[in-house]
Amino acid sequence: MLDLINYVLLTLIALIMLFPFLYVVAVSFSSYTEYMQSEFMLFPKKWVFDAYRFIFVSDAFVRSLWVTALITVIGTLVNLAFTASFAYALSRPVIGGKPVTFLVLFSMLFNAGMIPTYLVVKETGLMNSIWAMILPVAIAPFYLIVMRQFFQSIPSELHEAAHIDGANDLQSFWRIILPLSKPSLAAFGLFYAVAHWNNYFTAILYMNDPKWWPIQTFLRQIVVVNEAQTSLANGQILLENAPPAETIQMAAIIVATVPILVVYPFLQKHFAKGVMLGSVKG
Amino acid sequence: MPSGTRASSARSGTQRIRVRIWKDRYLLLLGLPGLVYFLVYKYAPMFGLYLAFIDFNPFQGILKSEWVGLDQFKRIFEDTEVIRVLWNTLYLSFLQIVFAFPAPILFALMLNEVRNQLYKRLVQSIVYLPHFLSWVVVVGIWIMFFRGEGLVNVFLRETFGWEAIPFMTDPSFFKPMVVTQVIWKEAGWGTIIFLAALAGVNPNLYEAAVIDGASRMRQIWHITLPAIRSTIVIMLILRLGTVLDSGFEQVFLMLNPFNEDTQNVLDTYVFYKGIQQSDYSFATAVGMFKGVVGLVLVMAANQVAKRFGEQGVY
């Protein structure tokens, strides 16, 4: 009996998580006439692509997608390069290792705040540059620590064997350690990539030129600030024939989320493995 | 292989360091990007905290602006807006701890009772997803539902004939909506750590309990709950340590001209004062205040966790 209640409740909760999506998808595919007639629908009788066509014709929107893809790819590569190399250096008995590790840990507990960080980014000349979205967040301290623990769990025999074969630290890192850490790199790479794709606020701080806005910042204009048709329209002609604003908003939400959905099965495979790998061993 | 012990006692301290640096040169090279990152983007900004102690005048520049000591911090306690903002932050955190913190625990308990592994994994797949959505998408969908002509109001109007409820503009709905969004987005993902703890429970305990005639509820009470007690305690204490954090990105999206007068939280206030109004000194002081208090809270929380016999975060 309790089992039944449990199943019912869980199914209800799962539906509550799912339903908003289904509604958004439904509205995004609904036609002008249907939208005007009935606003409470779950399944449009006729599926049209007007809203999607409007979005993809919009130069601003497509450009924003490209900008975001660029930031995500470059950003993730920078993330992994910085994080893996630093984590490895900190995992070995290196001179200065202990104080630097302390510095890293302390920075997790206390940061100077939004204004000083903003001023530093400004003074390093990153305003209005893609690099403002990438460099200030190059390393996530938590992933650094987990990766370091993973590297520390590699048996020292391996290092000794490499050393005997004449490899220096750089070579053993590149040829031996990195290939061993593929699961970790994949997991953190995915997490970093998702974070880049979902980032909206950094652009509000540092990107004054809307040409360089990533997709979530742009989406905010469309959905939160509620300027769906004007943000997207290439010109007056387009504006006159625009589909209902709400369908555009829904379509934009779906497009901004599809990459996450595509990547989601891989995320699922990795987040149990890759993240726990470091913390369990530590 | 000892590196010539007799010889090194003849070397000076700096020579030893130089030898060591040369020996570690590749590791130092590897660690250089990371080190530079932390120095530039985590520690250099700390010099900016100097702004909190001056009355920054953009015409005079940082170095020539007048030193005012703790005046900016005094302003924190005298400014009614800061006090309200502080209150909002704490109250929001309180609501989150009361409502959003237990949600993943209950959820994990429910999931743990499911025998059918396929169904369990299906539900998990669905409920983990909102965690990976951006806040813009979550708040955006929320706005679509709850605005004047959104789905909720249309439903209420067509079913009950009610007038539209101003969910998004009436300030009294603000905090409950923020907390509900957090639950929708994070309750599923939050179950992971509790399910991991539950997976470690010895199944023999359950078998023994069944033999002793314990009902399901009694089993949960005496076996399951104690198993996650330490996880709950640690998570709760750590959550208390971050009580001044309030989900800036989420709140920022929910603020609009109708509720921003009353619903700002600490971080959004720092943004408005500092970035938009360029009151650098005051905003830096408020931010520093939050950072210092946060640090003290986290350290205290960690100590308390250790006293409870748990490991602590560091």
Image: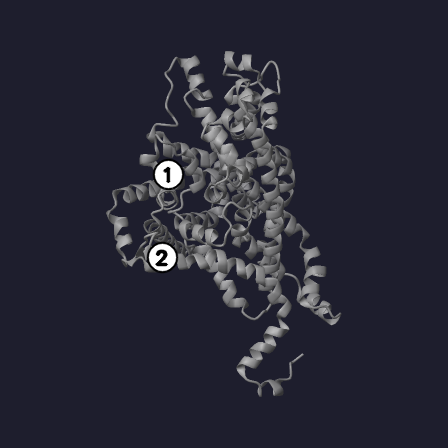
Q: Secondary structure at mark 1?
A: helix
- Write down the quadrant of residue B11 in the picture: bottom right
Residue found farthest to the right: A165
Q: Earlier in the sequence, mark 2 or mark 1?
A: 2
Residue drawn at the location 40% of the way across and 49% of the way down: B242
Q: Say if residue A4 shows up in the picture.
A: no
Tell me: B98 left or right of A233.
Answer: left
Q: In the rendered image, which residue does mark 1 sit on?
A: B95
Instruction: Give the quarter of the image for residue A190.
Output: top right
Where residue B166 appears, as percent x and y from the top left, is 37, 24
| Circles 2, 1 touching at the beta carbon (< 8 Å) | no
Indicate the secondary structure of the residue bearing disc 2.
Answer: helix
Alpha-carbon span between mark 2 and mark 1 = 40 Å
Q: Amino acid at mark 1?
A: Leu
**Residue at (65, 41) in percent of width and height:** A266
Q: Is residue B124 left or right of residue B236?
A: right
Residue at x 58% of width, y 28% of height: A58
Q: Position of residue B94 (x, y in %)?
A: 36, 41
Of circles 2 and 1, which is in front? 2
Question: Badge 2 is on which residue?
Answer: B62
Image location (x, y in percent) of residue B267: 38, 44
Front residue (pair A241, A162):
A241
